[in-house]
Image (spheres, helix red, strand yellow):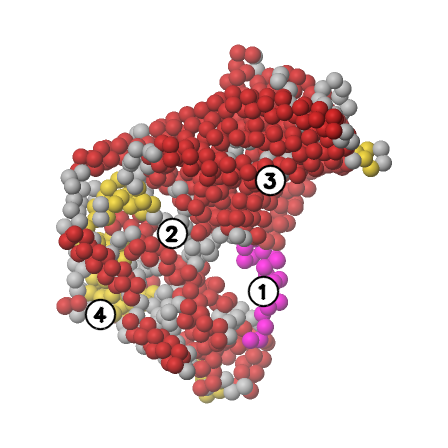
Amino acid sequence: MKTNKILNISNDLRWQIGEGFHDKLTEGIYSDAATIAQNSVQKKGDAKRFRFDRSLDKIVTSKVWGFPIMILILSVVLWLTIIGANYPSGLLSDLLIGNIYPWLKTIGESIGFPWWLSGFLFDGVYLALAWVIAVMLPPMAIFFPLFTLLEDFGYLPRVAFNLDHLFKKSGAHGKQALTMSMGFGCNAAGVIATRIIDSPRERLIAIITNNFSLCNGRWPTQILIASIFIGALVPENFAGAISTFAVISIALLGIFFTFMVSLFLSKTMLKGEVSSFTLELPPYRPPRFWKTIYTSLIDRTLIVLWRACVFAAPAGAVIWLISNVFIGDSNIANWMIIHLDGFGILLGLNGVILLAYIVAIPANEIVIPTILMLTVMSASITGVGSGNGVMFELDSINATGEILKAGGWTLLTAINLMLFSLLHNPCSTTIYTIYKETKSVKWTTVASILPIILGFIVCFIVAQVWRILM
Amino acid sequence: MTNPVTSLIVFGIVVVLLFLLFYPKSGFYWRIKTSFKNDTKILIEDILKKLYHAEDNGNTLNSNDIINSLNSSPKKILETIAEMENKELISFENGDIKLNDLGMDYALRVIRVHRLWEKYLSEKTGFDKKDWHEIAEKMEHKLDSLQAKELAINLGNPRFDPHGDPIPTETGEVEPINGKPLPTFSEGTIGRIIHIEDEPEIIYKQILAEDLHIGSHIHIIENNEKRIIFHSEGEEFILAPIVANNITIFELQKEEISEENTFRLSKLKKNEHAKIIGISGECRGEIRRRLLDLGFVINTKIEVDLTSPMNNPRAYLVRDTSIAIRNEQAKFILIEKK
């Protein structure tokens, strides 16, 4: 009874106090805080410092220099990542695949493992793990620290400030510029980075559209396919330029889709979510170099790598199994390829590509090795590769091109693969991360299915138009 | 391989079909869905609401008026009116329909849920102002009084909905609005906007387009049959009398007026100094709390710090901190220039 009485009194009081209660409370807190601060805080003359901040801000947010500086910095970061990662990636791959892998195979033989056990463990699980680590670790270990340094310095909030107007037009938040750029490194990390967006609706938009940023796992695929098929269209002198141009166009197309899908989501599914925009522009400060390196390696790189490994190991096993388990006189992979082929060709792709994207959900990095393995297997090419279910890559771009052409690839297949590589479901690490961040099956499903539907539609239309015109 | 032209045509047909089926509101799927749900309870409640609003404005309605104002078939409406008379919700007086006590109670309950839900939408969701009414129209038939009570407690027992309409209490009391429509005031009057009517939709949309805010003070400059001109928060507004009629004003006494020099923050120019005098009542929910938490509170000094390359958003210097907000939000912050 007593509690009820108290509740009733409190309801009555709320009724009497009226609507401005929260405002008055906040005002009270601020005025008290201001009085206390005035009486007890002594200010040192740091006006000079403040002027430096102001003049730097004037430049990086100016009409003339704001955008060029932004584009320059992002390009440098991406260039350093893609070019710089090649060397450590090569070293890691030599070590893990060139040395440890044969060594493991020998050990297995000497202990007397049956062929299927060593195939399952070493050709399947180990190889996928090794591949993911070799290809994924170096770019992330370069990209994330660079990005975190910029963040720590205080530049990134200015980017959000500059770009907010563009993002607002599609119903998104300026800070999505940052999560989008982060997505160029890794979509899973990009999704985690959306925590900086405090408005629920804009955060969901940023999470769902992050997959349209071409991630590190997909840049090499794009570059490889572009140099084999698109570079070959023009005289050798221009090959490099034209294939670079093709890859950049795909990345820009991704940005275009980010805006379009953001607009669509904010007008339909996400209409009712709360939206609020504010952005603090903190003062610049010298980045804490070692601390940044440490936290970005631990918080971002290793966590993402660990998640990728957890998913890559079973995927390796699946890839090996489908190529080595026979039903009748065909293995599962061939059987699936034949059945997926009709749909694949309708989309201007083929069964091998679709199967590769199904089994390589854990990491975009293993799509190309899987495609090569499956192509060699299904087209019965001899002399390359190391057997069913064993992923491989070739050093020579030309040799890779020969295999793909023998597998029935045309220029259309190449273009559509590039498009499909941009527009397909996020990798399982990202899907898992989206679930962790949103805690919602619904939004995770939307984020996973929406891009692949778009991919099907875009590839389908391109294929039909191509066939009509060519 | 299938002929590309055929497959494109098939694809086109599928897209068009999906579009027709699922286009928001007018798609076949949604229409079929709503037509199944159109049961008697909803119709009874809609008729009760019509009657309540008519009586509130001092008008009376007969069966024909109701048939004309609702979307259902005349036969169904007449049947429903008969049923309502049986249940003693309404009674006939010289052909006009009157609400009985029972009907009045019921109508107030429905209106209570409607206004509470609009309040909920304004405070806790991101739906646009123009969508509130329609969503609340659907929800008012769904919540029972226990749920309504829970909702009210969660919202802190609000007294007014976001349009300024009083929310009936659980016991059915309605606070009177003590204001009059804008066109009834003479030139020179200073008043406060206390209510903006959200029906009919066409006029409400015009008011929304003008960007008028509930709670803002206005100063009437010109008032004749053609147009009404008034100043508010440093801006000039020109409305047609028919539009202005849906805005309710409460006249202010001379000593209550302190906002002669009031502007919206979005109008602050570079190198000008100003002092915050409040946040408009039109700014609600999460974003209002966020602005307050960031220090946009009364008597705070404020100036423009930075302007982004596309002029929106702008960063303001508040308590030595640079905070960027969009011009759409800066409009809600009222300042006094120095």
Q: Is any part of residue A153 visible from this angle?
A: yes
User: Along the line of sight, which residue is nearer the eye, B224 or A56?
Assistant: A56
Which chain letter goes with mark 4? B
Q: CA distance from mark 2 to mark 1?
A: 33 Å
Q: Which residue is mark 1?
A: B34
Residue found 30% across the figure and 70% down from its top: A18
Which amino acid does the dot numbered 1 rest on? Answer: Thr
Q: Which residue is mark 2?
A: A276
Q: Are tags 4 and 2 found on a single chain?
A: no
Q: CA distance from mark 2 to mark 3?
A: 37 Å
Which chain letter goes with mark 3? A
Label 2 element class: loop
> B32 left or right of B168?
right
> A2 left or right of B191?
right
Residue found 36% across the figure and 65% down from its top: B162
The magenta segment is B23-41
Specify whether residue B28 is painted magenta.
Answer: yes
Label 3 element class: helix
For the C terminus of chain A, the image quarter is: top right
Which chain letter goes with mark 2? A
